[in-house]
């Protein structure tokens, strides 16, 4: 199956999330290391699934993106870091990885789903 342009953007966003996650994991709380690795692994799996066969990935893409945004918003510690940017690097990683790229994931996933339904 040949990937269309929107699907390529979707995979690029997922790869970007993985890259930001790789930088963010060492900055996080060590007691959540296992959960961070599991979340990072799920984004890697979603990138592969979205590349290979999009129809198996669009629902998990929506669910995980929403969970990440909700989790960042519900965490008082994350909100404090993002609002004060202290420590700066942590705040930037949380904002980019937790909101900007997740929003892009929701948008590109919606566009890819729309195009997938149109071609089927």
Image (spheres, grey):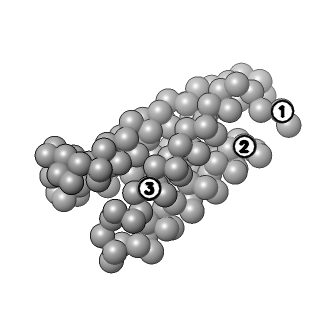
Instruction: Identify the residue at horizontal 68%, vertical 44% (top origin).
Output: 50
Other residues around mark 1 within 10 Å, as few (<14) / some (14–19) / many (≥20): few
Q: Mark 2 points at which residue?
A: 51
Instruction: Identify the residue at horizontal 77%, vertical 32% (top origin).
Output: 3
- Viewer-side label of 1, 3: 3
Q: Are marks 2 and 3 in contact (CB under 8 Å)?
A: no
**x, y percent for residue 21:** 46, 55
Quadrant of the image containing the C terminus:
top right
Instruction: Identify the residue at horizontal 40%, vertical 46% (top origin).
Output: 97
Marks 1 and 2 sit apart, C-alpha to C-alpha, by 9 Å
> Is residue 79 among what the camera can see?
no
**x, y percent for residue 28:** 33, 65
- Vertical placement of residue 77 versus 66, above or below: below
Instruction: Kindly state the secondary structure of the residue where label 2 is placed.
Output: helix
Would you identify the image quadrant in which residue 25 lies? Answer: bottom left
**x, y percent for residue 57:** 64, 47
Which residue is nearer to you in this view: 69 or 84?
84
- Vertical placement of residue 61 versus 100, above or below: below
Q: Which of marks 2 and 3 is nearer the N terminus?
A: 3
Instruction: Kindly state the secondary structure of the residue where label 1 is placed.
Output: loop
> Is residue 99 among what the camera can see?
yes
Q: Mark 1 points at which residue?
A: 2
Instruction: Identify the residue at horizontal 58%, vertical 45% (top origin).
Output: 15
Which residue is nearer to you in this view: 51 or 112?
51
């Amino acid at each position: 199956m040949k990937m269309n342009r929107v699907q390529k953007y979707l995979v690029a966003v997922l790869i970007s999330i993985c890259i930001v996650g790789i930088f963010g994991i060492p900055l996080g709380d060590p007691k959540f290391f296992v959960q961070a690795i599991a979340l990072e692994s799920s984004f890697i799996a979603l990138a592969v699934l979205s590349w290979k066969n999009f129809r198996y990935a669009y629902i998990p893409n929506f669910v995980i993106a929403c969970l990440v945004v909700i989790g960042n918003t519900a965490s008082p510690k994350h909100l404090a870091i993002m609002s004060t940017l202290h420590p700066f690097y942590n705040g930037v990683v949380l904002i980019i990885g937790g909101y900007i790229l997740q929003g892009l994931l929701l948008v590109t996933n919606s566009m890819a789903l729309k195009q997938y339904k149109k071609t089927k």
